Image: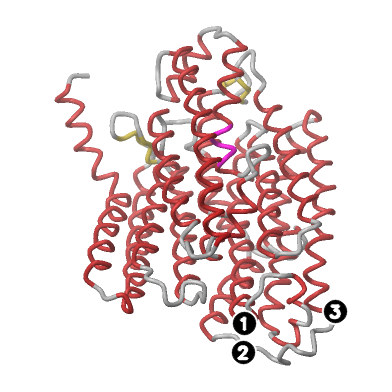
Amino acid sequence: MNPSEIIQNNINSLSYFLPELILTGMIVVLIIADLLLKKENSAWTSLLALGGLVIAFVAVLNQYDLGSRSIFNDMLAVDPFALYFKLLFLTSAAFVVLLSIGSVELAGRPVGEYFTLMTALTLGLFLMASATNLITIFISIEFVSVTSFILATYLKTRRRSSEAGLKYTIYGAFSSGLMLYGISILYGLTGTLDIYEIGTKLAASSANSLALLISIILMLAGFGYKLAAVPFHFWAPDVYEGAPTPITAFFSVGPKAAGFALLIRFFNVAFATEATNGEWAAIAGVNWSQLLAVVAAATMTLGNLVAIVQKNVKRLLAYSSIAHAGYALMGVVLLSDQGVYATLFYLVVYYLMNIGAFLVVIVVQDLVGSESIDDYKGLIWRAPLPAIAMGVFLFSLTGLPPTAGFIGKFYLFAALIKGGPGFYWLAVVAIINSVISLYYYARILKAMYFDQQDEKEPASLAVSPYYVVLLIALVVPTIFLGVYWAPLADLANYSVEFLRAL
C-alpha cells in the first residue's frame, strides 16, 4: 500500500472513529473549562464530562448498523464486540462521575483535572476494546495505565493514596516490560503485528512451540495485570484501598473489562484455529486454554481465601474483585462462542453489583467516616436503605437467586459443562470458591443485620436523597436481570458473532 492509499484510508476511517473523537474533543473542552473556572466552581466540569459521555454513548449506539470493519490500516476494529464493551465503559464512567459528585473524599478539592483524566481513561478503554494490532494493543494499555496511575494517587495528601500510586506504577512498568518482550518474540515468529495475520500464519506454519509458549506467557503478563489475575494481582488491594472510592469502583470494572476485551480478541484470533467440525481449538503445539484455566482457578482461590481475613471493606472488595476475574476467565478458556458469550454477560452483571457495593461503601464512609466492617454494625437500624442495598449486591456477588449474579454464574457453569470433561475440574473449583465467598460476604451481612451498634454511635443516619436515587438505580437492574435477562443475553450473543470475522 503506497503512502497516498494509507493517508486516504486514515481519512476514511475518521467517520467510524466518531465516539473516540467526541471523547477527545470533550477532553480538550474540560481542560479549557478547568482553566477558565475558579477553583470553587470546578465541580461544574462534572456536568461537562457527563454530557460528553452521554453524547459518546449515542454515537456508539449508532455504529451498531455498520457491521464489522477494520479502520486506520487494520490498527483498530469497529464491530459489535468492541461496541458492547464501549457501552459498558461509558455506563461505568457515567456512574462513577455521579458517585464522584457527592463524594466527601473529593469535597473541597479542584476536580477539573479529575474528570478530565476520567474521560481520558475512558478513551483509552475504547482503544483497548478495538485494538487489533500489537502496537495499538501496547499503546492503549499504556494510555490506560498512565491515566490510572494519576487517578490512583489523586488524594496526594494522604499517605496511602501516594503509596497506591507508587505501587501501581511499579507493577505496571514491570508488566509492560514483560509484555513488550513477548510482542517482540511473537513478531519474530510471524513477521507481522496484525493479530488476524498472526492467526493465519501460525495456523499455516509450524512455529517453534517453546518460543510461542514463552511469548504467550509474557503477553499474558500484560493482560493479567489489567485483570488483576494471579500472579499479577499484587497491586490491586493497596491501590483499591488507597485510591478515591469512586475511582476504585471504576478500576474494578472499566480497566478490568477492557483487559477481558483484549484478552478474548487476542487469544481467540491470534492463537485459535477453526477445526473441520466448525469448532475452535488452540493453535497447534501450545494448549494455552489449559494454562488460562490454571490461572482462573488460582485467581478465584487466592482472591476468596485472602478476602476472608480482611477487616477493611474496600480491601475485602478488592480481593473479591480478584476472585471475580477468575470466574469471568472460565468462559475465556473454553475457546467457544458460548464461553465468550457467558463472560460478556457476566461482566455487565458484575458491573452492576460491584459498582453498587462500592456505592454503599461511599455512603457509609461519608456517614461514619470509616471503611471498617466493625462500623457496619447495626446499619440496618441506622440506615436501612444502604443496608438492604448492600445485602442485594452481596447476594448477587455470591451468585444466589433471584439476582443477576446467579444468572451470570449459571451461564459460566453451563458453558464449562458443555466444554467437556476436560473442564469439569474448573467447575468444581469455582463451586467451592463460591461457597467460600459466601462466608466473607456473610460477615458484612452479619455486622449490618445482627450485631449491635456501638452505643456511642448515633441511632440513625440521614442518607442523602441523591444517594438514595443512585442506590435504587443499581438495585433494580440487579434484581430485574435475575428475573428477565433476555435483552442483555441477546446483545452479548450478537456481539460474539463478529469476534473472529473482520
Residue 9, given in percent of the width and then of the height, sits at 22, 32
Is residue 119 found left or right of 334 in the rendered image?
Answer: left
- 72 above or below 254? above
Q: Earlier in the sequence, mark 2 or mark 3?
A: 3
- 455 above or below 335? below
Stretch in magenta? 221-225
* Kind of residue at badge 3: Phe
* Kind of residue at badge 2: Ala
Q: Earlier in the sequence, mark 1 or mark 3?
A: 1
Mark nearer the viewer, 2 or 1: 1
Dot 2 alpha-carbon crowd within 10 angstroms: few under 14, some 14 to 19, many 20 or more: few
Distance (Cα) linking label 1 and label 3: 20 Å
Residue position for label 2: 462
Residue position for label 3: 450
Residue occupying image coordinates x 41% and y 58%: 118
Predominant SS of the magenta segment: helix
